[in-house]
Amino acid sequence: MTVIRGATTIDSDCKKDISAAVKELLDEIFAQNKADKTEIRCIVFSLTTDIHSYHPAKAARECGYDFAPLFACTEPDIRGGLALCVRAMIFAEFSAARPARHVYLKGAKVLRKDISSIYNIALDGPAGSGKSTIAKRLAEEYHILYLDTGAMYRACALNALRAGIDPKDVRAVEEMLKKLDLKVEYKEGIQHTLLNGEDVSENIRENAVSMAASDISAHRAVREKMVEVQRKIAESMSCVLDGRDIGSAVLPDAKFKFYVTADSKVRAKRRFKELTERGQNVELESLHREIVRRDKQDSEREFSPLKRAADAVVVDTSEMDIEQAVAAIKSIIQSKI
């Protein structure tokens, strides 16, 4: 008896997406294994707990795979596990001995490192260029993890501000790091930043924290601590990271690298809109001056400055909306896969 394994991810929990994904997975498994329906003894599906809309066994039967018994079960809820995933095990008795070719599609490719290697997408660029929003969308599109690296530095900055520590004071910051309790958790695919046990995911988006984050991230000790954590995560799974030096320093071997930028005035307008929608009282001209100052500071700092990796593709979003920017980057990624 030969057991063939496969898995795929779906875009959303609906009948249409489930049916399309199941058909694509089974078609690919049968094609790669040159399997005949007379050789199949049964097919067993398992699905993650976030899939409810339709039964994969029914989907398989409706698309023509009704020549063998079909079974399905729901997997245990595993924290941090791959979301919206359908797995299949096909039990076959081949007429001639041949090895099984396991098939993992879409976001499920990360489940088998021996079949498909882990890949990372690195997005760098100045503040307000849209890289964080783009990174999140790419993670959703490819069903991989989005690691918000900036949130980690912002949390450090917030901790310093709350403790009355000047973010530019090297010794004070290094001493603070010894007691820093910073954790990153993922709930339903969303990153939550915990500082001393408190979820500060919203607090770290305040403008004062953003400015302090630029100062505190310039310290070698801070960046070394954060980079160590980021690399460990990136080595364990495919993910999208955005920041100032991801492609040049944090993940120099990332398969896909992009430098996302935009005119400083355009970025100031985007930041103004974001902050005013949150109820913050800010001035556009003041924001523009801060962005220009931060660009200069980030580019000229001694340790790990804002820098475009030599092999990064430049994407200027000045005249693009998010949809256009995501589409442009996806097109480049697809051309290299």
Image: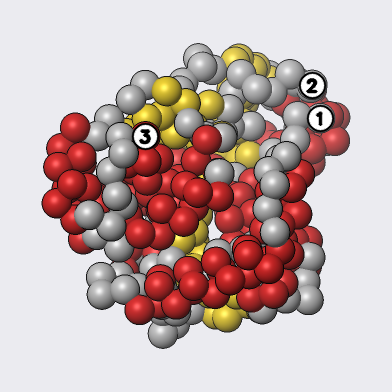
> Considering only vertical position in the picture, is 152 above or below 250?
above
The residue lying toward the viewer, choosing from 121 and 55, is 121
Residue at x-position 40% and y-position 65%: 246
- Would residue 70 be visible to someone looking at this image? yes
Which of pointers 2 and 1 lies earlier in the amino acid sequence?
A: 1
> Considering only vertical position in the picture, is 57 above or below 151?
above
Instruction: Please tell me whether mark 1 sits on a helix, a strand or a loop.
Output: loop
Instruction: Please tell me whether mark 2 sits on a helix, a strand or a loop.
Output: loop
Residue at x-position 68% and y-position 53%: 282
The residue lying toward the viewer, choosing from 239 and 324, is 324
As drawn, is 203 to the left or to the right of 37? left
Task: Give the amino acid type for the residue marked by disc 3 in the picture.
Answer: Arg
Q: Are marks 2 and 1 in contact (CB under 8 Å)?
A: yes
- Residue 223, percent from left and from top: 27, 56
Task: Give the amino acid type for the residue marked by disc 2 in the picture.
Answer: Ser
Residue that carries the numbered disc 2 in the rendered image: 53
Indicate which label's residue lies in the foreground, 2 or 3: 3
Residue at x-position 60% and y-position 75%: 261
As drawn, is 256 to the left or to the right of 87? left
Residue 327 position by quadrant: bottom right
> How far apart, in angstroms, are the residues tagged by discs 1 and 3?
45 Å
Residue at x-position 41% and y-position 53%: 212
Which of pointers 2 and 3 lies earlier in the amino acid sequence?
A: 2
The label on residue 162 is 3
The label on residue 14 is 1
Residue 111 position by quadrant: top left
Which of pointers 1 and 3 lies earlier in the amino acid sequence?
A: 1
Colour logic: secondary structure
As drawn, is 224 to the left or to the right of 134? left
The quarter of the image holding the C terminus is bottom right
